[in-house]
Image (cartoon, helix red, strand yellow):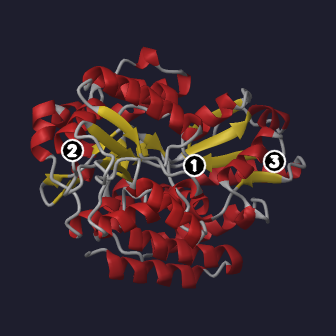
């Protein structure tokens, strides 16, 4: 799952974490065994940690000649880990492998010459045929593949409180934005205080992207990130206006809410809907809330907005062969099952047995095989880290001032600055 780019991290905390990572956890300094494989992640608790534990168990079976070393850095929902990792890479002390979002976010590491090409391993391990072509295309940079995804999450899912909808007489999901606006008006008329629960920064970006997909379609949406679609077009203007209208149905304190705070409004019956990635299914199940429904965001039919946690082989890794064994396990059918049944995501492989998964994941796996994959900027599959920051800044301002023209100009300027890098 993702991290918040705006999370504040105390310098002292980073220094302590960096020191810990550079010593006993296996950075290549004194205490590291030649059999150790340090796996650097931000999976420190919850379903993420459970998924990691499942994967580690499979790694110990497949790669018993190596020792797993947990290099997780907790806190900041991943932002702490990012900063520690950047420091280690700059110092030439990479972990044996590290977690990163698959897709365009990796271009920062590729351009810096910090990760190795894994294209030959893809062929050797059969991943080039096990993963769908659309994903392979999204993972390929200048003809090369640099990461192995552990999972696939879907971003464009609308979650709901079934009882709240039933009390308002809403019996079926909206399939278009106009239908959705009608439902939101109905909920408001029935006294629902927050028809649509929204959180801060990246959660707002997710909602905006879902609207863009509805108004532009899958191909033109993808074109926004590869230069084939202009950010200055009238269809983008329409999408920004539709997004602004949606925010009018949301909680006014959205800029102070994390995604789980918005989720709680749905669980407590104070909100009817929330747009969120499908990690919400695992979270709701863990919290014991069963009265939820889900559907693809209205107008996003046949577009599967994907994001993936992936792992890489850093240049200069002390145990490259051990890392390759980890990556092979990660991409295998057994490894993906061990991880995703606990994480709440689905396998990147299309040959997985859906019977091994709960209802939501079964539905997602079926869609993954036939829908059009589209990337996500806030989750790194569509854009670089610099581009992410520019979009986050522009949308944060828009949440306060609602200036449609200013947002469109800022998004166009960000594309012009980062699209070619």
Residue that numbered label 2 is attached to? 319
In percent of width and height, residue 382 lies at 36, 60
Residue that numbered label 1 is attached to? 176
* SS category of the residue bearing label 2: loop
In the displayed structure, does residue 200 sit left or right of residue 347? right
Frontmost residue, 317 versus 242: 317
Relative height, residue 343 to residue 302 (above, below)? above
Q: Is residue 133 visible?
A: yes
Q: How far, Cα to Cα, is label 3 from label 2?
A: 57 Å
Dot 3 or dot 1, earlier in sequence: 1
* SS category of the residue bearing label 3: helix
Quadrant of image for the C terminus: bottom left
In percent of width and height, residue 223 lies at 32, 64
Residue 11: which quarter of the image? Answer: bottom right
Q: How far, Cα to Cα, is label 2 from label 1?
A: 51 Å
Q: At x 30% / y 40%, what residue is drawn? A: 37
Frontmost residue, 164 versus 289: 289
Residue 7: which quarter of the image? Answer: bottom right
* SS category of the residue bearing label 1: loop
Frontmost residue, 362 versus 240: 362
Q: Residues within 10 Å of mark 1 (few under 14, many from 20)?
A: some
**Furthest residue in direction front, as rendered:** 30
Frontmost residue, 230 versus 19: 19
Dot 2 or dot 1, earlier in sequence: 1
Relative height, residue 286 to residue 306 (above, below)? above
In percent of width and height, residue 245 lies at 68, 66
Residue that numbered label 3 is attached to? 187
Relative height, residue 75 to residue 320 (above, below)? below
Dot 3 or dot 2, earlier in sequence: 3
Residue 278: which quarter of the image? Answer: top right
């Amino acid at each position: 799952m993702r991290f918040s780019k705006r999370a504040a991290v105390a310098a002292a905390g980073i220094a302590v974490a960096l020191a810990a990572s550079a010593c006993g956890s296996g950075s290549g300094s004194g205490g590291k065994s030649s059999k150790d494989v340090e796996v650097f992640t931000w999976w420190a608790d919850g379903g993420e940690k459970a998924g990691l534990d499942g994967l580690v168990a499979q790694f110990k079976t497949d790669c018993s000649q190596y020792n797993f070393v947990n290099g997780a850095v907790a806190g900041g929902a991943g932002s702490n880990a990012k900063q520690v990792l950047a420091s280690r890479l700059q110092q030439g002390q990479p972990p044996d492998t590290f977690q990163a979002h698959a897709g365009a976010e990796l271009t920062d590491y590729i351009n810096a010459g910090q990760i190795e090409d894994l294209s030959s391993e893809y062929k050797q391990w059969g991943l080039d045929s096990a993963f769908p072509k659309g994903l392979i295309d999204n993972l390929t940079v200048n003809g090369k593949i640099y990461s192995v995804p552990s999972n696939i999450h879907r971003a464009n899912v609308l979650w709901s409180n079934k009882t709240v909808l039933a009390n308002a007489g809403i019996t079926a999901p909206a399939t278009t934005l106009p239908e959705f606006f009608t439902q939101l008006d109905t909920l408001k008329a029935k006294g629902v205080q927050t028809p649509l629960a929204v959180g801060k920064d990246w959660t707002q970006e997710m909602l905006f992207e879902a609207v863009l997909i509805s108004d532009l379609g899958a191909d033109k949406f993808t074109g926004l990130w590869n230069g084939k679609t202009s950010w200055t077009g009238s269809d983008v203007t329409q999408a920004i206006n539709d997004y602004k209208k949606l925010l009018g149905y949301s909680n006014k304190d959205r800029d102070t809410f994390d995604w789980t705070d918005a989720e709680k409004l749905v669980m407590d019956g104070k909100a009817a809907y929330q747009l969120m990635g499908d990690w919400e299914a695992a979270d709701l199940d863990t919290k014991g809330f069963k009265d939820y429904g889900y559907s693809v965001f209205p107008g996003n039919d046949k577009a599967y907005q994907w994001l993936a946690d992936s792992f890489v082989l850093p240049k200069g890794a002390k145990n490259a062969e051990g890392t390759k064994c980890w990556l092979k396990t990660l991409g295998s059918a057994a490894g993906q099952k061990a991880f995703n049944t606990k994480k709440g995501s689905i396998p990147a492989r299309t040959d997985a047995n859906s019977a091994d998964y709960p209802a939501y994941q079964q539905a997602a796996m079926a869609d993954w095989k036939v829908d059009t994959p589209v990337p996500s900027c806030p989750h790194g599959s569509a854009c670089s880290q610099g581009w992410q920051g520019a979009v986050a800044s522009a949308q944060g301002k828009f949440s306060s001032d609602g200036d449609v023209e200013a947002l469109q100009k800022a998004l166009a300027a960000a594309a012009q600055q980062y699209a070619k890098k």
